[in-house]
């Protein structure tokens, strides 16, 4: 056991040289170690280090966005990950060499590139993931756009006397973008932003652990009798471009009954690839009467967390009024841990929902309370093992 800080430093340095390659590390083990490192850092860090870390934490997102705009990542993707000198790079990108040098210095300091010799750059895996059209690249665009709302949170609360937001049409987003439109209406008029938003929704699949149908007993609960082949098996409301339903269809090709994908028309219109057999996409506003009556199940993944109480209850009512006696409602959502000292990601996502939607991330108890207020009976709460952020599948009935 390390007895002094210098022993600890030596142990960590030698552990660094014997780390297995990234793809050989189990996620659970990785998270455990990262958690320990974070605790160690929090214990060790004096305010003189914490304060600049907090003050400068927004720059990586901003400078990566600038590097995207200049075409830096695309240049390295095109060069298939080869090293490039400043001069070679300056011929492939937008903007002047002086700025390029400063941007590259920042990106090397943040371990996105490595400067193998002065002004010769080797892209690290993260750099290669930010090219145009990539999901991580779209995530940067999306969260950089959201950051304009983060920058207005303080002004928003100063103007409104620090009242907890609950109006979906008056969040920091509206202040930042000088609009009265709801974020989803604004997206409709901003196709580039809509594109990155859709991509972020698809990318979020990889952060959520098991798919819902790995933790829910699908074949036991979602069976339709042969005589009910006209009945919809599953309606995915706010299902984005269909990523969840496609994964479900691939996993259970034998299940009878159509799978209905519903989302706003501008999202459904963005679907380019043909959907698998039995998956039908329809533009539908979930606040309007639900056209699919008596489906076996209605499913919403991370849809209601975008809405404060008033609209969440309205959307739930539209479902409740068309459910059959044996229909099931499945709500798959992030759950903010109950109790003291929740992890930073959970507390941060809550503010993200607030800044864009005046909404919130709910705890398990808050989800159950919401569903009960909407008149549902919560029959089960299903949970997986491997998510980096807690999620639960709420199974509710009439
Ligand atoms: C956070 S995303 C979740 C997407 C998808 N369920 C997933 O988990 O990846 C919320 C989705 O709700 C959709 N949405 C927003 N307002 C809606 C409405 N009024 N009716 C139907 N869908 C809506 C959005 O377009 C978006 O695709």
Image (tube, rainbow, N blue to C red):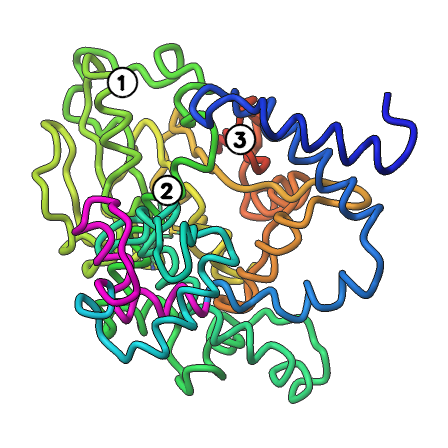
Question: Residue tagged by mark 1?
Answer: 251
* Label 1 crowd (10 A; few <14 / some 14-19 / many >=20): few
- Upstream in the sequence, badge 1 or badge 3? 1
The mark found on residue 125 in the picture is 2
In magenta stretch: residue 244 = no
- Quadrant in which the N terminus is drawn: top right
Label 1 vs 2, first from the N-terminus: 2
Residue for badge 3: 387
Task: Name the residue at 9% across, 27% down.
Answer: 277
Instruction: Give the camera-side residue of 163 and 351.
Output: 351
Which of the two residues, 94 or 337, is positioned nearer the viewer here? 94
The secondary element bearing badge 3 is classed as loop
First reached walking from the N terminus: tag 2 or tag 3: 2
178 sits left or right of 157 in the view:
left
- What residue appears at the point 57 percent right and 54 percent down from the top-left corner? 349
Q: Disc 1 and disc 3: Cα gap in Å?
A: 20 Å
Q: Which residues are magenta?
A: 62-88
Q: Mark 2 and 3 residues: CB-CB less than 8 Å, in contact?
A: no
């Amino acid at each position: 056991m390390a007895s002094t800080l210098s022993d600890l430093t030596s142990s960590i340095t030698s552990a660094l040289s014997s780390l297995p390659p990234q793809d050989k590390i189990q996620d659970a083990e990785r998270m455990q170690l990262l958690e320990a490192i974070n605790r160690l850092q929090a214990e060790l860090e004096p305010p003189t280090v914490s304060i600049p870390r907090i003050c400068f934490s927004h720059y990586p997102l901003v400078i990566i966005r600038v590097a995207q705009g200049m075409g830096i990542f695309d240049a390295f993707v095109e060069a298939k990950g080869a090293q490039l000198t400043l001069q070679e790079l300056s011929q492939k990108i937008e903007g002047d060499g002086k700025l390029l040098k400063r941007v590259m210095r920042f990106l090397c300091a943040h371990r996105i590139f490595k400067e193998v010799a002065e002004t010769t750059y080797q892209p690290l895996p993260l750099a290669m993931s930010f090219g145009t059209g990539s999901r991580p690249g779209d995530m940067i665009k999306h969260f950089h756009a959201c950051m304009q709302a983060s920058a207005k949170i303080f002004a928003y609360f100063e103007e409104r006397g620090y009242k907890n937001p609950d109006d979906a049409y008056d969040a920091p987003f509206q202040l930042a973008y000088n609009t009265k439109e709801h974020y989803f209406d604004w997206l409709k008029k901003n196709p580039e932003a809509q594109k990155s938003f859709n991509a972020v929704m698809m990318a979020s699949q990889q952060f959520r652990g098991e798919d819902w149908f790995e933790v829910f007993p699908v074949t036991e609960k979602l069976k339709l009798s042969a005589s009910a082949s006209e009945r919809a098996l599953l309606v995915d409301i706010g299902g984005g471009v269909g990523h969840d339903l496609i994964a479900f269809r691939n996993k259970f090709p034998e299940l009878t009954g159509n799978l209905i994908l519903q989302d706003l028309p501008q999202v459904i219109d963005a679907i380019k690839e043909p959907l698998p057999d039995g998956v039908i996409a329809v533009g539908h506003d979930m606040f309007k009467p639900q056209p699919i009556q008596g489906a076996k199940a209605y499913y919403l993944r991370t849809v209601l967390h975008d809405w404060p109480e008033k609209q969440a209850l309205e959307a739930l009512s539209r479902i409740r009024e068309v459910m059959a006696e044996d229909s099931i409602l499945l709500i798959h959502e992030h759950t903010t841990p109950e109790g003291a000292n929740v992890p930073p990601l959970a507390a941060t996502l809550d503010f993200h929902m607030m800044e864009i939607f005046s909404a919130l991330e709910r705890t398990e108890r808050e989800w159950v309370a919401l569903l009960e207020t909407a008149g549902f009976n919560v029959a089960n709460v299903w949970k997986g093992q491997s998510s980096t952020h807690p999620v639960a599948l709420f199974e509710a009935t009439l």
